[in-house]
Image: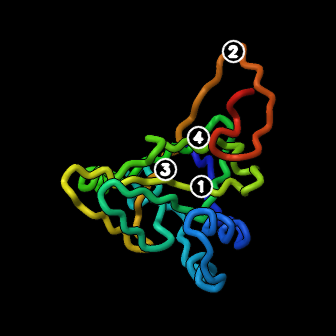
Amino acid sequence: MQRIGKFHKVSEKQFLSGWKDCFGAAPREEVLSIYETIRLPRRATAGSAGYDFFAPAEITLKPGESAKIPTGVRVEMEPSWVLKCYPRSGLGFKYRLQLNNTVGIIDSDYFYSDNEGHIFARITNDTREGKTVVIPAGTGFMQGIFVEYGITVDDDATEVRNGGFGSTTGR
């Protein structure tokens, strides 16, 4: 097994900004209290491929509702690796909980972005059975799997990332 990455918390300043972007203004002390409880992703067992990401606060989604979640986490990893994020299997199976972009792709250079590589997830309760999903604070809701990738022999990409979603398109 190769050891190719390390999870970190984003700074308090970045988490406060991400929280405000997702949920609007909230008392600073309340958001910092949430920040203090952030757990870094971890595998549940030695045989698990996925690193569980934990909800920073309770999230309740009625059928059809979505939420953008600031995880408070960033990941440093070796070049030629990517972190692929998926909903936790049980939540997908029971509630059709979906990541809005299907699979989240966290590139190795995202760590160096202006937002510190803060990983966000937008999830939707896509149930067809009218079920409300409640994800308690500190509960796993998403899993990330590290995957190595290759590039073509004639690849000439030299641009440097600065941003998240869509920051590398149109070049």
Say what amino acid the circle numbered 1 marks.
Ile
Question: Mark 3 or mark 1, which is nearer the start of the sequence?
Answer: 1
Which residue is depicted at the point 67% across and 52% down? 76
70 lies above or below 25: above
Give the SS element for disc 4: strand
The location of residue 87, given as percent across then percent down, is: 39, 51
Query: Residue shown at 27%/64% (left/top)?
Result: 132
For marks 1 and 4 on the same chain, the one whose residue lies earlier in the sequence: 4
Q: Which mark is residue 153?
A: 2
Q: Within the image, what quadrant is residue 79 found in?
A: top right
Q: Is residue 102 above or below residue 15?
A: above
Image point 43% across, 48% down: which residue? 99
Q: Do residues under tags 1 and 3 come within 8 Å of each other at their CB atoms?
A: no
The answer to which quarter of the image holds residue 59 is: bottom left
- Given contact means CB atoms under 8 Å apart, are the residues at marks 1 and 4 in contact? no
Q: Position of residue 164 (x, y in %)?
A: 66, 46
- Element type where label 2 sits in the image: loop
Per the rendering, the mark at residue 119 is: 1
- The amino acid type, in three-letter code, at marker 2 is Val
Q: Quadrant of the C terminus?
A: top right
As measured in the structure, the alpha-carbon distance from the residue carrying label 1 to the one carrying label 2 is 30 Å
Residue beneath label 4, please?
82
Residue 167 versus residue 78: which sits nearer the camera?
A: 167
Q: What's the CA distance linking mark 3 and mark 2? A: 28 Å
Between the C-alphas of marks 1 and 4, the distance is 13 Å
Residue appearing at x 70%, y 51% in the figure: 111
Tell me the tag on residue 37.
none
Of badges 1 and 4, nearer the viewer stands 1
Residue identified by numbered label 3:
144
